[in-house]
């Protein structure tokens, strides 16, 4: 027997039973208790948890990936009580569950106090990423960064701080946000940046995003737009040619609106505009070399140096070829030589000519093909007013329909020629300024009118065919080249009221030549005088000598002016 301080006598068996009961009260299934490692054997770690029985934990919970054991006798550890007594009389414990529950408590506390947790991104799952913060947590894709991220895999393996935005211990759900943390940091940076930002100052920035029209530069809590037109004095087809996300740049503040928090930036403004000294480097007539950087329907743009381009208009590409589109002559990237035709510094325009590098073939054409010389060529095109004959590469001569034949029977050139025909012609005229080359085919033969006096002299009679009937007369063909005019008064002795009753087109008639004017190509004819041998003072009708419809109209009505 023993006594306590109050003098009560306490039975030793009772005291022993009380201590055993007290130990049992301190060990409750589902809770965490403190224990001391007694031994480490092949399969289990034995732990004293101040209970009537010792506890055991599977050795696997202390085995690292490389096989090492992370615990040894004497270590004090927190363990989770799973079962107070198993078949072997030992308490079933778990170190992993104890750690997990402790972490859950710490996370719950961090969530309640809006504190940050640290973790490593471990994998990609639908909608976001998984994060190890001691337990598995979910990081939605929208919460990874300030802007949407296309390639989430690049974050795997990286360690960050996160804010717990959703916590459910019962379901085991933890949702994290990195964006919330970044936004808070960004706001702090923004206030500092806005406080010192001024128009004209050069600032450091990081390329944050690239679009078709420019790049957004992070200046520290606030983004500024570097428009594509302010990137370089040279042509920029797309901002990605100059920048990539994450690149550090020095930019100048062009505009700043503190109320709307908008900043316009420039990069080319850090350098001198090459157009300021353009007239010192280039002058009209100067030959230059450059690279084709763009093609338009009307010409090609040539880069002479960074920020300086000139235009070769489509009309300045060739002396002889009709260029329908610049792509038929040039391609982007081609190196070309050209001559400066004009410089407009104010509007930043330089006109270039490519054909001026070579001699204009029209300038030497008259020397090569003098007027009166004969040439040979191929029919390249046929129109209603004539045919175009290819003489040299890119140089065509025009033979007008009136110069195809001495005959008046040619109504359309295609009645005689077709494309590809090889023909001979005579050079009639060359106009280099207007780039006109006039040819004649009928001139290869002598003019039949030069022999008209001999063949169709005044007073001679001939058979002719009525080619055309007019109200006041008829055109009569004497042969393939010579026509004469038969006035209505020369058809019969008696007055002819209606010429159509007297003559028919295609009809053959006997006529007498009563008037010949070779230099004007006029031949007057008569039917009624065929049998009359006396021609003295013969023909006085003023229209008798006219042989063309135009002549007839003018002589019939005089020089009347219509008003």
Image (cartoon, rainbow, N blue to C red):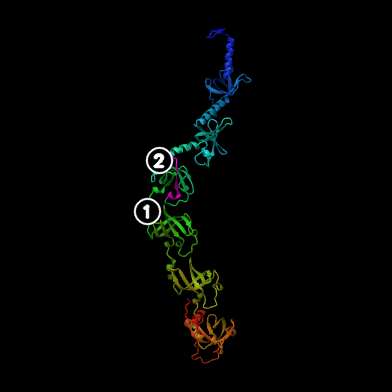
191 vs 486, nearest the viewer: 191
Q: Count residues near mark 2 (Cα–Cα under 10 Å), then give few for <14, some for 14-19, many for 20+.
A: few
Q: Is residue 475 visible?
A: no
Q: Count residues near mark 1 (Cα–Cα under 10 Å), then give few for <14, some for 14-19, many for 20+.
A: few
Q: Is residue 301 visible?
A: yes
111 vs 274, nearest the viewer: 111
Residue 343 belongs to magenta span? no
Dot 1: element: helix
In the displayed orientation, state which residue is furthest to the front.
259
Q: Earlier in the sequence, mark 1 or mark 2?
A: 2
Q: Which residues are magenta?
A: 220-232
Mark 1–mark 2 Cα distance, whole angstroms, equals: 35 Å
351 vs 403, nearest the viewer: 351
- Asked whether the beta carbons under mark 1 and mark 2 sit within 8 Å of each other, the answer is no
Dot 2: element: helix
Q: Which mark is residue 276?
A: 1
* x and y percentages locating residue 385 in the rendered image: 52, 72
Which of the 4 image quarters holds residue 223?
top left
Residue 224 belongs to magenta span? yes
Q: If the image is split into quadrants, where does the N terminus sit?
A: top right
Foreground mark, 1 or 2, reads 2
Per the image, the residue denoted by label 2 is 195
* x and y percentages locating residue 434 in the rendered image: 44, 68
Q: From the viewer's perspective, is residue 328 above or below residue 386?
A: above
Which of the 4 image quarters holds residue 97?
top right
Q: Identify the residue at image location x=46%, y=70%.
A: 437
In the displayed orientation, state which residue is furthest to the left.
280
Q: Which mark is residue 12?
A: none
* x and y percentages locating residue 531 in the rendered image: 55, 91
Q: Identify the residue at image location x=38%, y=57%.
A: 282
In the displayed orientation, state which residue is furthest to the right.
87
């Amino acid at each position: 027997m023993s006594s306590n301080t109050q003098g009560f006598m306490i039975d030793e068996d009772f005291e022993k039973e009380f201590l055993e009961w007290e130990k049992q009260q301190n060990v409750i299934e589902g809770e965490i208790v403190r224990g001391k490692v007694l031994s480490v054997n092949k399969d289990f770690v034995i732990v004293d948890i101040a209970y009537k029985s010792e506890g055991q934990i599977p050795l696997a919970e202390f085995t690292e990936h490389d096989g090492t054991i992370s615990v040894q006798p004497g270590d004090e550890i927190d363990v989770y009580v799973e079962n107070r007594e198993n078949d072997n009389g030992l308490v079933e414990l778990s170190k992993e569950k104890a750690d997990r529950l402790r972490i859950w408590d710490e996370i719950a506390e961090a969530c309640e106090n809006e504190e940050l947790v640290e973790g490593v991104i471990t994998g990609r799952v639908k909608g976001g990423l998984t994060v190890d913060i001691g337990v598995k947590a979910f990081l939605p894709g929208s919460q990874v960064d300030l802007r949407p991220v296309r390639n989430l895999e690049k974050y795997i393996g990286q360690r960050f701080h996160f804010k717990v935005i959703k916590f459910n211990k019962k379901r085991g759900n933890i949702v994290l946000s990195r964006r919330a943390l970044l936004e808070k940091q960004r706001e702090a940076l923004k206030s500092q940046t806005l406080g010192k930002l001024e128009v004209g100052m050069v600032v450091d920035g990081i390329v944050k995003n690239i679009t078709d029209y420019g790049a957004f530069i992070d200046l520290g809590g606030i983004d500024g737009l570097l428009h594509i037109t302010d990137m370089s004095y040279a042509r920029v087809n797309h901002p990605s040619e100059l920048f990539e996300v994450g690149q550090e740049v020095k930019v100048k503040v062009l505009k700043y609106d503190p109320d709307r928090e908008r900043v316009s930036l420039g990069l080319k403004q850090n350098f001198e505009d090459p157009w300021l000294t353009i007239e010192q480097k280039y002058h009209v007539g100067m030959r230059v070399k450059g690279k084709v950087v763009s093609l338009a329907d009307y010409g090609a743009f040539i880069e002479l140096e960074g920020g300086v381009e000139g235009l070769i208009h489509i009309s300045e590409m060739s002396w002889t070829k009709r260029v329908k589109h610049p792509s038929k002559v040039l391609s982007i990237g081609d190196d070309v030589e050209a001559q400066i035709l004009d410089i407009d510094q104010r509007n930043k325009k330089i006109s270039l000519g490519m054909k001026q590098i070579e001699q204009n073939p029209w300038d030497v054409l008259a020397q090569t093909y003098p007027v009166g010389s004969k040439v040979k060529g191929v029919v390249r095109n046929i129109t209603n007013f004539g045919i175009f004959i290819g003489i040299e590469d890119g140089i065509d001569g025009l033979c007008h329909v009136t110069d195809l034949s001495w005959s008046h029977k040619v109504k359309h050139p295609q009645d005689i020629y077709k494309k590809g025909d090889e023909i001979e012609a005579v050079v009639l005229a060359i106009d280099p300024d207007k780039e006109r080359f006039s040819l004649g085919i009928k001139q290869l033969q002598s003019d039949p009118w030069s022999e008209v006096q001999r063949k169709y002299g005044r007073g001679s009679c001939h058979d002719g065919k009525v080619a055309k009937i007019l109200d006041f007369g008829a055109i009569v063909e004497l042969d393939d080249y010579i026509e004469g005019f038969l006035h209505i008064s020369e058809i019969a002795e008696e007055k002819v009221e209606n010429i159509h009753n007297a003559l028919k087109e295609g009809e053959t008639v006997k006529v007498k030549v009563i008037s010949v004017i070779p230099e004007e190509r006029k031949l007057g004819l008569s039917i009624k005088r065929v049998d009359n041998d006396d021609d003295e003072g013969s023909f006085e009708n003023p229209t008798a000598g006219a042989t063309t419809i135009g002549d007839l109209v003018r002589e019939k009505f005089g020089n009347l002016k219509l008003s």
